[in-house]
Structure formats: structure tokens, C-alpha cells
């Protein structure tokens, strides 16, 4: 188990390395929002006004994405004038990293100054109201199937030992996303997201259990990142791209290729919703609630 001093120093080390590429203060580029792009959704980062790009592999001590479809790099830029830091590909617990390393990027982006965390992922639909290609606004989450990223000695400068999770996904940010979807006539579902460890997909029996617990969608990321962000005082919002029906409900075996294919097909609507929502989130950080 890593001690609090070790993890705090790791965050500072990564922050110092990133400042060699992007001076978050003298260049007047202090990101207001952080955006994590999930499987098949990374193309958005290629289309923004870019300030700098830093591959994870160039950062000593930083976890590297190993999954196809995850480029594994930070992209710094602006979306409608809003300064953002984008993770073009995330790291997952199933890749063999410790949970503290899985949420290290969130902690580093908070250290940069980001006050909003916008999470995205590709997910399997559990609820019968969902269909492949749907976009689902996250209203709550179930994280009990993965270890908490807060296990271990608490770093008091980051947050309290026992943070409340009564409102993980900020209602004000959710309303901005709803409003944006209405303006662009984008069909937007809402629901509860459940995270498993992966990398195997869930069995039909597990899907029935998840439905009984109240989950609408299931995936292998996101909830632990949200917990770390709430712990550090960030406002959090999230959208799932429903790429398949979970547990083989479609009658054929699930595959990562299918997930990426549906995500690519949904990408134009997804990008429009995320970009337009972020433009409206300027000035909506934790100091402006």
C-alpha cells in the first residue's frame, strides 16, 4: 500500500513534469475543466484549439494506457474559449495498476487547477429503456464492486477522510447538459452507472443482479475517478455512450470491436453534446457555485 506522502509526491512530480510543457500560469493557461474520453471517443481531442500535447509515456511514474482506442496522452486546449485539459484515453484497474494510480490523472488535473471533471465512457446497457447508440447522462453510481480509491492514509490537503457521496454528479452541471441536449435535439437518456473491475464482460446472471440493484448501465471505469474528484472538491458530470446491451442480451458475444464501432458511429452527436455543454460551463467551477 502506498503511503500518503508517496502519492502526494507522485502527483507533484507529474505536475512539475507537465509544467515543462505547459506553464499553467505564465501562459495564462490554467484549465478550468478536465475531460476524460472513453473507448472510441478520443477523436474529440483532435479537433480542438490545441495548446500542447503530452503523451503519458513521457511522464515518469505516470500510468500508460494499454487498451486499443486509447491514445494515452494529455491534450491541452480551448473549447469555445474554455481552457481544458483532456485525457485522450484513460487507464483502468484491469490493466494491472493500483487504484491509486488509476485515479492519479484526476488528482494531477485537479492540481493543475481544473475545478470541473467531465467523465465519458462506453458502457453496456442494463435497463430495457436503453439501446445501442444512446447517450446516458449519469445521475448516480454504484462503486461497491471495485476498491475505493480512498483506501489508505488520507491526504488532508486533498479532502476529508470521509467524504460524502450524496451528490456525486453535480445537479447544476447536469442541467447544463440537459439544456444543451434539448437545444440540439439530441436524445438524452438518464441513469445510474455501475463499475466492475473488468476486463471480462459481465455474465447474464450478473446483469440481472445489476438491474435488481438499480443500475441502468455497466462499464469498467468512471466511478473511482468520480470519487477521487469529489474527494478533492471538484464538480463532476458524466455521459455514457451505450455501445451494446450488457451480458449478451443482443444474442451474440460481446467484443471490444463492437464497442468501438458503435462509439465511432455515435461520435458526432456525442462531440456536439460535450463541446456545447463545456462551452456553457465556463465560469462554473467550484468557486462559482
Image (cartoon, grey):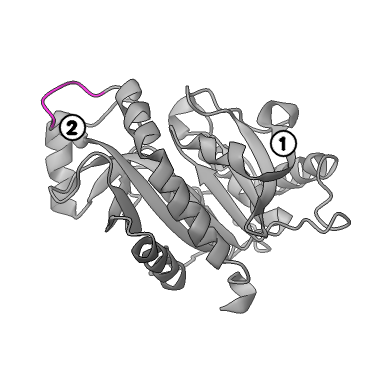
* Label 1 secondary element: strand
Place of residue 126 in the rendered image (x, y in percent of width and height, measured from the top left): 19, 44
- Choose the circle earlier in sequence order: 1 or 2: 1
Disc 2 target residue: 247
Does residue 226 belong to the magenta stretch?
no
Q: Give the alpha-carbon distance from disc 1 to disc 2, as whole Å.
A: 37 Å
Residue depicted at 47% across the width and 53% down the height: 274
> Circles 1 and 2: CB distance less than 8 Å?
no
- Quadrant location of the N terminus? top right
Disc 1 target residue: 53
Place of residue 227 in the rendered image (x, y in percent of width and height, measured from the top left): 47, 55
- Quadrant location of the C terminus? bottom right
Residue depicted at 31% across the width and 52% down the height: 136
Q: Which residues are magenta?
A: 250-254
Residue depicted at 54% across the width and 56% down the height: 117
Q: Residue placed farthest to the front in the image? A: 184
Main SS class of the magenta portion in the image: loop
Place of residue 214 in the rendered image (x, y in percent of width and height, measured from the top left): 19, 55
Q: Residue placed farthest to the right in the image? A: 26
Does residue 252 belong to the magenta stretch?
yes
Amino acid at each position: 500500500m502506498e503511503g500518503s506522502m508517496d502519492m502526494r509526491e507522485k502527483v507533484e512530480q507529474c505536475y512539475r513534469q507537465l509544467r515543462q510543457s505547459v506553464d499553467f500560469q505564465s501562459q495564462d493557461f490554467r484549465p478550468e475543466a478536465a475531460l476524460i474520453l472513453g473507448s472510441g471517443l478520443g477523436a474529440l481531442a483532435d479537433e480542438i484549439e490545441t495548446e500542447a500535447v503530452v503523451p503519458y509515456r513521457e511522464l515518469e511514474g505516470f500510468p500508460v494506457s494499454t487498451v486499443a482506442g486509447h491514445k494515452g496522452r494529455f491534450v491541452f486546449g480551448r473549447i469555445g474559449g474554455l481552457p481544458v485539459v483532456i485525457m485522450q484515453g484513460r487507464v483502468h484497474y484491469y490493466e494491472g495498476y493500483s487504484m491509486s494510480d488509476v485515479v492519479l490523472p484526476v488528482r494531477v488535473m485537479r492540481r493543475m487547477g481544473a475545478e470541473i471533471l467531465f467523465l465519458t465512457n462506453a458502457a453496456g446497457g442494463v435497463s430495457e429503456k436503453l439501446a445501442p447508440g444512446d447517450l446516458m447522462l449519469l445521475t448516480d453510481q454504484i462503486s461497491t464492486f471495485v476498491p475505493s480509491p480512498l483506501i489508505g492514509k488520507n491526504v488532508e490537503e486533498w479532502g476529508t477522510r470521509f467524504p460524502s457521496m450524496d451528490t456525486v454528479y453535480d445537479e447544476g452541471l447536469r442541467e447544463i447538459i440537459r439544456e444543451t441536449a434539448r437545444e440540439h435535439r439530441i436524445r438524452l437518456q438518464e441513469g445510474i452507472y455501475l463499475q466492475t473491475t473488468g476486463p471480462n464482460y459481465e455474465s447474464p446472471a450478473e446483469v440481472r443482479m445489476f438491474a435488481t440493484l438499480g443500475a441502468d448501465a455497466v462499464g469498467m471505469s468512471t466511478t473511482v475517478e468520480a470519487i477521487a474528484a469529489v474527494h478533492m472538491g471538484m464538480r463532476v458530470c458524466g455521459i455514457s455512450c451505450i455501445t451494446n446491451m450488457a451480458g449478451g442480451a443482443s444474442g451474440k458475444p460481446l467484443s471490444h470491436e463492437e464497442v468501438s464501432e458503435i462509439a465511432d458511429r455515435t461520435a458526432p452527436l456525442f462531440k456536439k453534446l460535450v463541446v456545447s455543454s463545456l462551452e456553457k460551463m465556463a465560469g462554473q467551477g467550484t468557486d462559482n457555485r
